[in-house]
Amino acid sequence: MNSTPAFHAKSLSATVVQTAIPIAVLASLKLLGAEATATAAAATPTSDWSTSASLTVKETYDSNVYMQSVSPLANQGSLVTFFAPSVGVQWKPSTMFNIALNYSPEVSFYHSESSEDFVTHKASANLNGKIGDATWEFLNSLAWIDGNDESPTFFGPGGAPAVGGVPLRDRRDAAIWRNSFKFQQPLGDNWFVRPVATFYLHDFMTAQKANPPGATYANYVDRSDINGGLDFGRRITGDTWCFIGYRYGSQHQATALNTTIAYSNDYQRILAGLEGKPFSWLKLNLSAGPDFREFGHDVPVGFERHKTLLFIDASATVTPTKTDSITLSAKRFEQPGYGGASVFEDATYELAWRHKFGAKMTIGAGARLLNWDVEDPVKRNEWWYNGNAMAAYAFDKHWTAEIGYSYDSVESLVANTAGREAERHLGYGSVKYTF
């Protein structure tokens, strides 16, 4: 396995977030500084430490490691051994401040395709608390992937798979940062105001190379997204709220080898939403609205630099019985392509069902539909269909076993691009021990 090179994030957004989010945290807390001081003086908090640890071992059969159907790499299968210890520490000294730290190195070995071996170091630091009636949270996560430092090379007609290429991309050297901040201040009993900020950075650490004869080498490019804004909400009834919101954001895309094209852009987003529990059996978190995008001057000639697009981020959990839960989600947004010189609408729709037989046995099934509609002049439009099922059994508070199966089918709507299409079967069995 290749060693991971030093982190080299250099986008403007990465610099901005180092100051923007901490300032947002401090500014929001300062709004209630007097109240926080009074609350702290009156309280007598005691330290509350807790720890958690687990170990998961999983064996999977992947029928199509390279997500190819008509090339020399087509339908290459492999057993995959997955090994993931996990440790966590939580500290809750008072209601005003809680912190949870977690770390898990996830190791994957491909027995028949050793070039795909990788380790993902996952770490998170999540902070939250309550100051008077106000609540706040600051969530931070990092996935540091130590894998092959060269991107895959594809030989099928149509070039590299976009949707189907994601599993290969996520085995290569990279660092993925995600941060979000939210501060919700009630205004009386029926209103609230909520400043928010989010940040995403995908730093690819793979080498960029020219295409070999008759093939496509995947040159990955860094990208980032930072935004912030404000929500105003009103209680409809009980635990159900509606809100309107505004976001101002910026996306950055680096350039790939031998091109100057990049789809960096600024955007303004108007949102309307609904959240809470209108019924005892239904939980909602819905937001949608128009994105007003303005792209820079590095786009191709003829590309419309001013666009209005639809943003959706929605989920619903239905519990028709005490032993059944159904989760539906939909997300649609614009983002620069990780392969460079492209921008696309990313849409994902998911359905998951779980049923419990007592306290020990759980079964489930689900489906996912994903579409990447790449904007002109790039000609790509792909769909990824997934169906899955699982069963888990908890022998006691320490031991849990699970088996599962999923089927993937990737389809390209552009003619003569069979290299972008693939089918894959995944079957797995796992055992988890919680200390």
Image: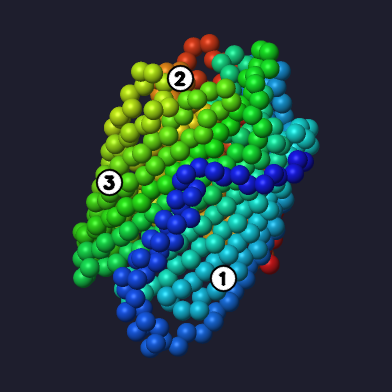
Confirm or deny contact between disc 3 and disc 1 (CB under 8 A). no
Instruction: Give the percent coordinates (x, y) of residue 14.
Output: 49, 48
Could you say which quadrant of the image residue 434 lies in? bottom right
Circle 3 sits on which residue? 271
Q: Is residue 297 above or below residue 194?
A: above
Residue type of the residue flagged with mark 2: Val
Q: What label does residue 38 carry, if any?
A: none
Circle 1 sits on which residue? 90
Gap between marks 3 and 1, in whole Å?
A: 34 Å
Q: Secondary structure at mark 3?
A: strand
Callout 3 environment at 10 Å: few (<14), some (14 to 19), or many (20+)? many
Q: What label does residue 378 carry, if any?
A: 2
- Tell me the residue at 39%/42% (across/down): 250
Nearest to the observer: residue 151 or residue 255: 255
Q: Earlier in the sequence, mark 2 or mark 3?
A: 3
Q: Earlier in the sequence, mark 3 or mark 1?
A: 1
- Tell me the residue at 68%/67% (across/down): 435
